[in-house]
Image: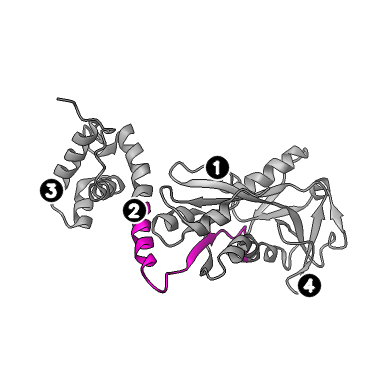
């Protein structure tokens, strides 16, 4: 008799995966069982059955606390995306049979403006003119949870790192410019070199090491031979150009050059500007015509 292996075609039970994920997230059976409205004995038996199917231990039970094994960590990372994809498929199937499907929701970080999202939507507007679309600003740390929970269908951020349990693609590059208050000493300039900014304080939305965009700016400063003076913006969630109103700081933005915010801000071109990437993130194992139009590689 052949021994079954995980590749023999036995599909993973989504219900059992959800149970496993609850135990992994709670680091134990007690809270997970309460959340799932199960007894601890029933939940423990379900996890043991899953371990027998996969022929590996998912939890290390040797200590006082329950810890994931390396195999369990792999399953946890994949289970979250797989469960979210299954929920998305169920919703898409339902919507296909309704007259009024919900809008396709795009979450974008504050580093990408609503105007930039609108421009990225051009292929969808051209080819799917009746599609219902919604753009929603989401802080970077909330993008992945919003995808898993089905609150958004696509995430846009400034970044290049490949998340382990999401699919990603760079869909655009935007030249970076400098924004200053219109009373700033640099406001009369029509073009700046990064070396002209050596003595300027730069407003960012997160410190270095906590934001790709900040690290991206830091690398460009170091390439020019000096260290920037970063100041973290106290007002979060507003368009990037607003950060310089009423102060002597500068901000790096992707807004067009010229007056902005009713003339209160001036955006100045940089010579040889860095190109800031726009990265799209979405759930694996999902399909979407709208997403395909947005994420096609642009030449």
Which of 240/92 is in front? 92
Q: CA distance from mark 3 to mark 2?
A: 24 Å
The image quarter containing residue 234 is bottom right
- Local packing at callout 2 (Cα closer than 10 Å; few below 14, some 14-19, many 20+) is some
N-term-proximal mark, 3 vs 2:
3
The image quarter containing residue 125 is bottom right
Q: Which residue is mark 4?
A: 263
N-term-proximal mark, 1 vs 3:
3
Q: Which mark is residue 42?
A: 3
Q: Position of residue 69 (x, y in %)?
A: 30, 33
Q: Position of residue 176 (x, y in %)?
A: 73, 53
Q: Which residue is mark 2?
A: 86
Which structural element holds mark 4?
A: loop
Which of 232/251 is in front? 251
Q: Position of residue 117 (x, y in %)?
A: 61, 62
Mark 2 vs mark 1: in front: 2
Which structural element holds mark 1?
A: loop
């Amino acid at each position: 008799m052949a021994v079954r292996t995980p590749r023999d075609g036995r599909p993973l039970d989504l219900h059992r995966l959800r149970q496993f994920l609850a135990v992994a997230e709670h680091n134990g059976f007690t809270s997970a069982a309460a959340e799932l409205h199960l007894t601890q004995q029933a939940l423990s038996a379900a996890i043991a059955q899953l371990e027998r199917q996969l022929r590996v231990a998912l939890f290390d039970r040797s200590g006082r606390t329950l810890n994931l094994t390396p195999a369990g960590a792999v399953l946890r990372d994949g289970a979250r995306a797989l469960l979210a994809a299954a929920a998305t498929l169920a919703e898409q199937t339902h919507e296909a049979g309704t007259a009024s499907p919900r809008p396709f929701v795009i979450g974008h970080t504050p580093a990408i403006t609503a105007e930039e999202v609108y421009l990225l939507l051009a292929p969808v507007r051209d080819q799917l003119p009746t599609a219902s679309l919604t753009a929603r600003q989401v802080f970077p740390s909330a993008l992945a949870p919003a995808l898993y929970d089905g609150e958004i269908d696509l995430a846009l951020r400034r970044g290049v790192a490949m998340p382990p349990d999401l699919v990603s693609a760079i869909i655009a590059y935007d030249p970076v410019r400098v924004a200053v208050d219109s009373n700033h000493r640099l406001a009369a300039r029509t073009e700046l070199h990064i070396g002209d900014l050596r003595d300027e304080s730069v407003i960012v939305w997160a410190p270095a090491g906590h934001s790709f965009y900040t690290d991206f700016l830091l690398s460009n400063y170091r390439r020019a031979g000096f260290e920037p003076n970063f100041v973290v913006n106290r007002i979060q969630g507003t368009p990037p150009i607003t950060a310089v109103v009423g102060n002597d700081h500068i901000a790096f933005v992707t807004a067009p050059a010229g007056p902005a915010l009713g003339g209160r801000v001036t955006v100045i071109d940089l010579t040889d500007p860095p190109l800031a990437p726009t990265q799209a993130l979405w759930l694996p194992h999902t399909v979407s015509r709208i997403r395909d139009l947005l994420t096609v590689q642009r030449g």
